[in-house]
Image (cartoon, grey):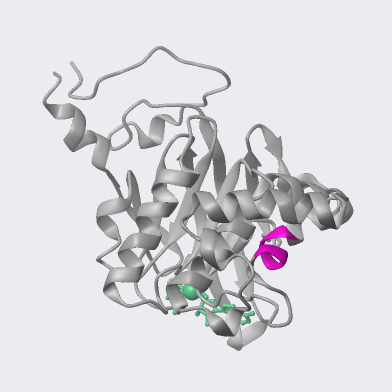
Amino acid sequence: MTMFKTRSPVGRRLKDPRLDAVEPESGDVAVRIRAVVKHFGEGERQVQALRSVDWDVYAGQMSLIVGPSGCGKTTLLSVIAGILNADSGSVTIFGDEVSNMKDSARTRFRASKIGFIFQQYNLLPALNAAENAAIPLVIAGWSKGKAVARSREVLKSLGMGPKVDSLPNQLSGGQQQRVAIARALVHEPQLLVCDEPTAALDQQSGHSVMELLKESAVRPDRAVVVVTHDNRVFSFGDRIAHMDDGRIVKLESRSEKNQSGHG
Ligand SMILES: Nc1ncnc2c1ncn2[C@@H]1O[C@H](COP(=O)(O)OP(=O)(O)OP(=O)(O)O)[C@@H](O)[C@H]1O
Ligand SMILES: [Mg+2]
């Protein structure tokens, strides 16, 4: 008997028997990571940043990566997002194995399927909010007019309607992060990756940014992965992967708590 509510298998959901003890059955696997190893440097100065990581990220959920400074969180996120190449192992995103792609194919894949949010908002200072958030669409070949019109809509949906024409230096930190969220979501990526998205924000703005991410980015066919130090953010995660020294050492699932009352 299982304490987890189980659903019948859907789509190309993949099951890893090693994770059975902690992973309740759920939606499609969005990101499947197997035996990922990554080191930096050579010889005595070599750092083993990832020591064979296995992890499944599910669609329809927000998954968190937490752990002490230097444990490999950003490295893992960068490998997932195709910013860094792993030394070995495989990363599959919605069924496509990115670890095998050539650089040009991976760049295209990344541009269309993945959205990025970082601690530093990385907005271009000379562009207003709508122009900043439109960048992924312009890169994808949209005309500037159409891209900015679409970006304005996304900003409005994020409560930024009155600020669409403001320059970054006219916005608060929380507002700049909203522009960064709009930029990450404007091309409707299937996977959103966020590295310490609340680190530069006060408690209140951090909370509302996380609420916004949860409302606007989590969809049945999409997945969100957030790296965080910030324990105020933990309650937003459907699943939490705890890392230490290049490994995932514990997996927690909030759905376990949510579902225990249902049998
Ligand atoms: N480009 C690099 N060159 C050399 N070593 C690196 C590089 N990037 C990361 N490292 C090392 O790899 C390890 C993991 O780093 P990573 O940035 O993934 O940690 P983190 O968990 O994100 O830490 P933090 O919470 O401080 O952001 C650390 O020991 C770090 O010093
Ligand atoms: Mg980091």
Question: Taking 157 as reference, is 263 left or right?
Answer: left
Q: Nearer the viewer, residue 204 or 222?
A: 204
In this view, 70 is above or below 88: below
Where residue 183 appears, as percent x and y from the top left, is 63, 59
Q: Residue at x 51, y 78 (%)?
A: 171
Horizontal and vertical percent position of residue 223 = 51, 42
Q: Is residue 9 left or right of residue 151?
A: left
Q: Residue furthest left?
A: 261
Q: Is residue 133 magenta?
A: yes
The image quadrant that residue 222 belongs to is top right
From the image, give the main secondary structure of the stretch colored magenta: helix
**x 71%, y 40%: residue:** 97
Residue 64 in picture, x, y percent from top left: 39, 54
**Part of the protein shown in magenta:** 130-134
Q: Residue at x 63, y 76 (%)?
A: 122
Q: Is residue 202 left or right of residue 106?
A: left
Q: Residue at x 63, y 34 (%)?
A: 94
Q: Could you say which is closer to the camera, residue 157 or residue 120?
A: 157
**Residue 78 part of the magenta-drawn span:** no
Q: Is residue 55 visible?
A: no
Is 211 placed above or below 220 here? below
Q: Which image quadrant: the N terminus?
A: top left
- On screen, residue 201 above or below 192: below
Q: Is residue 40 above or below residue 24?
A: below
Task: Tally the marks.
Answer: 0
Q: Position of residue 239 (x, y in %)?
A: 34, 45
Quick one: 193 or 129, which is closer to the camera?
Answer: 129
Q: Residue furthest front?
A: 162
Quadrant location of the C terminus in the rendered image: top left
